[in-house]
Amino acid sequence: MMIESLRSDSNWAPYLAVLPQQLDSLVFWNADELAQLQASTVSQKIGRGKAEEMFTQHVAPLGLSNYDLELLHRVASIIMAYAFDIPEEKPMDTENSNENTTGDEEGDDLVSDSGEDEKTILSMVPLADMLNADAERNNARLCCDLEDLEMRSIKPITKGEEIFNDYGQLPRSDLLRRYGYVTEQYAAYDVAEISTESIISAFNNDIAIPGNQQVEPLSKVELDERVELAEREGFYEDSYDLAHPGADGPSIPDELVALVYILLVDDETLKSIQAGSSISSRSKLTTELVGQILAVLLQRRLQEYGTSIEEDESIVQMGSLSDRVEKAIQVRVGEKRVLKAAIQETESFAASNKKMRGPQNSVEPSGNKKRKAGETTKNTKKGRFT
C-alpha cells in the first residue's frame, strides 16, 4: 500500500483515492493529548513504538525513496480502520463433495465474525469502504463464500435511505484508537478494564472494608497457590473488562468474581477446590465480602482517573476545547460510568460469608439478607459459573 499510494499509474489509484489521507486515530496524538485519556488503558494499546521498530527493521533497509514514518503510520492506520478478516478458503472435502458449496445464506460467513480457531486473511474491501458505519442504524453486513464477497441488507432499506455497515460492539475507546472518532451510539458498549496485577497487589496488604474491619494480607505462598488454582480453573486473566449491565450479562464478569472469591476463601474451602470440587455457581460466589472487596478495588480504579464525571461535564460545558480533548473526555467519562455501574452492582452481592476467611467469620454480617426458600439470583450472563 505504501508503494501503490505513491504511484499515479497504480491500478489501485481509484480505490486509494477514496480512502482518507489521514485518520485521527490515537497514533497521531501527542503526549499532552493522550494524557487527556487519564487512566484509560486504551493508551497502552496504540503500538506506535512497535510499528516504528518494524519499519526500521524491514522497510528502511530497502532504500526506497519518499517513504518515512509518517507515511507508515498513515498506511498502517488505514489498514487498521478499513481491513476485514476474510475466512480463508477451506480445502474441498472429497468425502462430502456433494454438499452445497454454491454460497447459500446458511453456508456463508459474516466477515470478521469467524470463530477464534478459524484461519482468516486480512483484506482490504473497496465495496465495504464505500459505507459509513452505525451501531444503531446498521442495515447491511459484508458476507463471503468461497468465491465472492457480498454486501447484504439485513433490514428493509427504503429508497433514498443510507446504507450503513457495522464495526461491531466496540467501546468508544476502540473506536477512537482504530478509527479516530467517537459517537454516543457506541456508548452502550463502553468498557473499563481493571488489571489483575492491581488486584493481586491489593491482597499483599490489609484491605479495609465497611465496619472498620480489615482483611489480612496473603503471604506470597498463599497468593501463588490461589493464582495457580485460578489458572487451572480457567478464570485467571491479565485484566478484566467491566461493562454496562444488560441482556448480555452483569457488569462484573464471572471470571473476576471467581478470582476474588478464590483470594478470599478460607483454607478448608481452598483445599476442597484444589482437590477437585467444582466452583460454585455465581449466586454463591457473590458473597457480601466479595462484593465489599470488589467495591474497594473498583473505587481505587475509579480514583486513578483524576477527575470525577461531574468535573468532566463542567469542563465540557465551559467550551473552547479542542476536538481531540472532547473525544478523550467522552472516552474517559464512558469508562467512569461503567466503573460506577460495577460498584453499584457489588451492593447486590449478598451470599453467605461462611466460607470466607478474615474477621467476618466470627459474626454473620447484619447486611447479609437471607433469601427465601425457592428464591434464586437472576443472572443473564452466559458465562462459566451461571
Image (cartoon, rainbow, N blue to C red):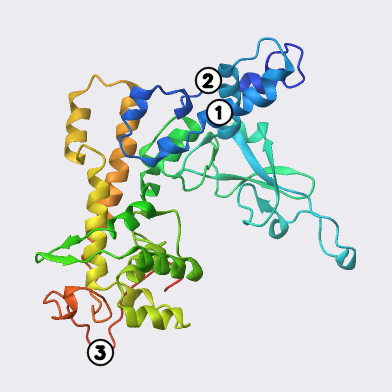
Q: Which picture quadrant has residue 304?
A: top left
Q: Nearer the viewer, mark 1 or mark 3?
A: 1
Q: Is residue 155 above or below residue 41?
A: below
Q: Position of residue 17 (x, y in %)?
A: 64, 18
Numbered badge on residue 373: 3
Asked whether residue 382 is in view, the answer is: no
Q: CA distance from mark 2 to mark 1?
A: 8 Å
Task: Identify the image quadrant of the C terminus.
Answer: bottom left
Whether tag 1 and tag 3 are in contact, CB under 8 A, the answer is no
Numbered badge on residue 77: 1
Q: Is residue 329 left or right of residue 83?
A: left
Task: Say which residue appears at 27% left-offset and 83% top-offset.
Answer: 375
Residue at disc 2, secondary structure: loop
Residue in the foreground of this view, choosing between 225 and 65: 225
Whether tag 2 and tag 1 are in contact, CB under 8 A, the answer is yes
Q: Is residue 295 left or right of residue 152?
A: left
What's the amino acid at mark 3?
A: Ala
Q: Residues within 10 Å of mark 1 (few under 14, many from 20)?
A: many
Q: Give the labeled residue for mark 2.
A: 22
Q: Position of residue 68 (x, y in %)?
A: 61, 15
Residue at disc 3, secondary structure: loop
Q: Residues within 10 Å of mark 2 (few under 14, many from 20)?
A: some
Q: Is residue 248 above or below residue 179?
A: below
